[in-house]
Image: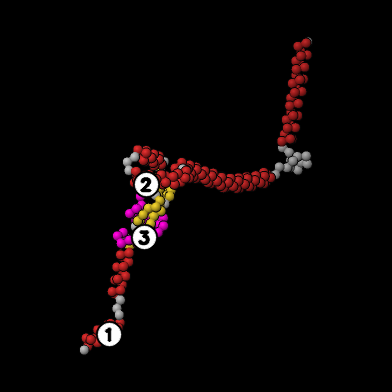
Amino acid sequence: MSDEKDRNASDEQTEISEDTFQQDTDSLEDDLFLSPDDSEGEVIDVGQFDEEGGAGDQELAAENVALKKNIEELTVECDEQKNRVLRIAADLENFRRRSQREKDDMRKYGIDRVVMELLPAVDNLGRALAHAEADAGDNSMVEGVAMVYRQLLSSLEKHGVQGFESKGTPFDPQRHEALQQVESTELPNNTVVEEYQKGYFLHDRLLRPALVSVAKNVQNVQTHSSESELTEIDPSSSEQDSDSEEE
């Protein structure tokens, strides 16, 4: 008896489950296949997706244009910054070269003021030594002073100070300063006759010009004047010569 009751109960449960499954299937079909006229269902418009897709494309195009514009602006700004950096680098290189050149000039020509203060003493020592040698002749004291004078000149030469001779050379306004003109019949024009103050160079730069007197050749002037007198013709004398020839 118990087995039969269990079979009946199981049959009842199976029938109930089949009915429930059928109801669930019907409700699912109703939900999936709604009528377009059903007031509770929503009508899906396919064109809506097209409009949304077109709007998205327009937004993407606008974003692309904006990105391109930003890229162009950044490119221009990058070029400007690059040019600015190049100019700064060029200015820095020019400043470095100018500083190095000024440093070299200071090392090379920085002693010009000191040397200019020493040169008058060197000139006076040389003049005194020349007079002493002319008057005293061979003298140990004169020889000692001459040795000191040569040592002083040698020290100046080590630092690039070089004197130059001017007597008997053509006058050069870049190196000489003329104090007077001296008439001469032997020397050609613009020849240095006498040197009153010795000139010096500091390396390749003129430190002090030489004070000199310049020759003016008088013989050339007289020759030119006599030649000009001979070339002049007296009209009265030419007329007298022509009358005498006619007689």
Residue type of the residue flagged with mark 1: Glu
Task: Answer with mark 2 or mark 1, whichever residue precedes in sequence.
Answer: 2
Judge whether residue 123 can be spotted in this image.
yes
Answer left or right for 100 relative to 149. Answer: right
The residue shown at (47%, 45%) is: 117
Question: Given this view, does label 2 or label 3 mark the residue nearer the observer?
Answer: 2
From mark 2 to mark 1, how far is it between C-alphas? Answer: 68 Å
Q: What's drawn in magenta, residue-wise?
A: 165-187
Q: Nearer the viewer, residue 102 or 31?
A: 102
Marker disc for residue 131: 2
Query: Mark 1 — residue?
Result: 239
Considering the image in quadrants, where does the N terminus appear?
top right
Residue 68 within the magenta-colored segment of the rendering: no
Task: Answer with mark 2 or mark 3, whichever residue precedes in sequence.
Answer: 2
**Element on which disc 1 rests:** helix
Task: Answer with mark 3 or mark 1, whichever residue precedes in sequence.
Answer: 3
The residue shown at (32%, 64%) is: 218
Question: Given this view, does label 3 or label 1 mark the residue nearer the observer?
Answer: 3
The residue shown at (66%, 46%) is: 55
